[in-house]
Image: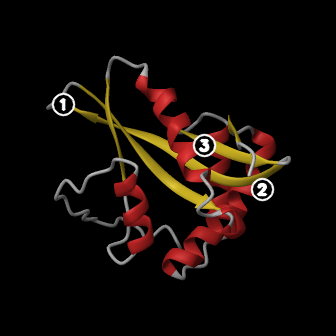
């Protein structure tokens, strides 16, 4: 397969990102997201009102994958960790280098920053295929467990 075009998302990409995020929620957690809330969340990122950005992978003019980057300040290290989130690849394009291309673009995007110290991501414990992919691409299990204190579930009105 030819190379994928990796680019930063624009406002015109909102609906495809909303669709991919809805698919991701269903495939990974069997959650049906509230479309109006999801759309508003994606819109905020695209309008640069949130501290995030989407990278998209295109093939033959179609968006076939996405990744969102957010950041977290580390006072211990005096620098930023960049979090990889909302990773989705259209099923027929999986295992063809889409995520690798997105990761390379993310590394180039943040790697030139003197205050960038690393990239992190969440992965479900039971998602063996994703774990294998991330390890193969250089990610390490650092022994942390994600815990959450919910103020709202964010999924219901």
At mark 1, the secondary structure is loop
At mark 2, the secondary structure is helix
Residue for badge 3: 54
Q: Could you tell which of marks 2 and 3 lies nearer the N-terminus?
A: 2
> Where in the figure is residue 35, as x and y percent of width and height?
69, 68
- Please identify, in this view, whether the residue under mark 1 or under mark 3 is nearer the observer: 3
3 in relation to 36, above or below: above
Residue at 18% x, 29% y is 77
Q: How many marks?
A: 3
Question: Cα distance, mark 1 to mark 2?
Answer: 36 Å
Colouring used for the render: secondary structure
Residue 15's mark? 2
Residue for badge 1: 75
Question: Cα distance, mark 2 to mark 3?
Answer: 13 Å
76 sits left or right of 13 in the view? left
- Please identify, in this view, whether the residue under mark 2 or under mark 3 is nearer the observer: 3
25 sits left or right of 119 in the view? right
């Amino acid at each position: 397969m030819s190379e994928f075009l990796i680019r930063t998302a624009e406002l015109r990409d909102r609906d495809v990102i909303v669709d991919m995020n809805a698919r991701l929620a269903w495939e990974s957690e069997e959650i049906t997201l509230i479309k109006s809330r999801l759309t508003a969340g994606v819109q905020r990122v695209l309008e640069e009102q949130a501290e995030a950005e989407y990278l998209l992978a295109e093939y033959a003019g179609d968006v076939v994958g996405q990744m969102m980057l957010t950041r977290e300040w580390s006072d211990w290290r005096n620098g930023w960790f960049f979090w990889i989130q909302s990773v989705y690849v259209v099923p027929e394009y999986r295992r063809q280098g889409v995520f690798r291309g997105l990761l390379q673009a993310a590394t180039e995007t943040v790697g030139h920053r003197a205050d960038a110290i690393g990239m992190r991501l969440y992965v479900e414990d039971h998602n063996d295929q994703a774990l294998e992919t991330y390890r193969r691409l250089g990610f390490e299990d650092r022994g942390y467990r994600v815990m959450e204190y919910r103020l709202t579930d964010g999924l219901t009105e």
